Amino acid sequence: MSTRTILGRSDRAFDVSIYVVLVMVAVVGLYPFLHVLLVSVTAPETLIRRGTGFIWPGKMTLEAYREVFGSEAIRRALLMSIARTVVGTAVNLTLTTLTAFPLSREALPGRNVFLTLIVFTMLFSGGIIPTYLLVARLKLVDTIWALILPTAISPYYLIIMKNYFEGLPEELYEAASMEGASELQILTRVILPLSRPILATLGLFYAVYHWNAFFDAMIFINDRSKYPLQVLLREIVVQGNVQDMMGDRVIFGQNMKMAVIAVTTIPILVIYPLIQRHFAKGITLGAIKG
């Protein structure tokens, strides 16, 4: 047997082993989510008889999802989460862009001082109590702005966007300036059309944060009717029940828990493929230049 044949077989064996490992990793990663979906569509009597440790649900029903979307409390919480995610992401991207653009220009007076202060906030913060006192003093408690304004700009994402702007050709700025464009016109008409990858990437990061956040709502929102979906999900998982806001019924069941978890997870899974082609490019280009 020739050496080339031996090497060819060893290469194929190595490729097969890599694929086997990747498939196993994929199964391990996907199974928890698939298990949530399976439990959510399993009939309650089947769960009582078999428990939740199964591969195939047996008798299937969508009753849990009908209960979820039929609950006024969950519908309100879902709308609150959608509003927070849409408005919060828009505010985040707008303020991050308007701050990153001037910081990317070396001619900005005091640029290094501003950057130092921004990096300082990445290492140190005032803490929960001073933040709450500030939000309360501004009369933002029990409003959606209490969930948006304290995290309006992420210093880390700001630096990534600044680095992305710095990586664009300087000739673009010079050509636009020679045409008489102002700084705002350069940003809106020249820079932003070329910044779709970084905008899509940071927009996804901001949206995922707002959609998944619950701790700040537990602190700043006292009115139960203004709870976002994640806070309601926490109550369902911890307390083990879904109670209608009118107080007329209490629904128990693992399938209800899993149905609510699925409802909170699926929107992000649907959005990600839509911007996947921008994702890797945006985060890579934004991290090249320090």
Image (cartoon, rainbow, N blue to C red):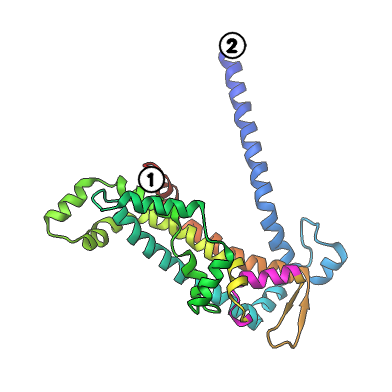
Does residue 182 lie above or below 73 as drawn? Answer: above
The C terminus sits in image quarter: top left
Q: Is residue 276 visible?
A: no
Q: What is the x, y in percent for residue 279? A: 44, 51
Determine the image quadrant of residue 229. bottom right
Does residue 172 lie above or below 217 as drawn? Answer: above
The N terminus sits in image quarter: top right
Q: Residue at point 42% right, 64% down?
A: 92
Q: Is the magenta region chiefly helix, strand or loop?
A: helix
Q: What is the x, y in percent for residue 277? A: 43, 51
Disc 1 residue type (three-letter): Leu
Disc 2 residue type (three-letter): Ser
Q: Which residues are magenta?
A: 224-238
Mark 1 lies on residue: 285
Q: What is the x, y in percent for residue 70? A: 65, 81
- Mark 2 or mark 1, which has the lower sequence index? 2
Quick one: label 1, few (<14), some, or many (20+) residues within 10 Å?
A: some
Element on which disc 2 rests? loop
Does residue 10 lie above or below 258 as drawn? Answer: above
Q: Residue at point 76% right, 58% down?
A: 56
Q: Quick check: is 225 in the magenta stretch?
A: yes
Mark 2 lies on residue: 2
Q: Nearer the viewer, mark 2 or mark 1?
A: 1
Horizontal arrangement in the rendering, residue 9 relative to residue 47 (left or right):
left
Which numbered disc covers residue 99? none
Element on which disc 1 rests? helix
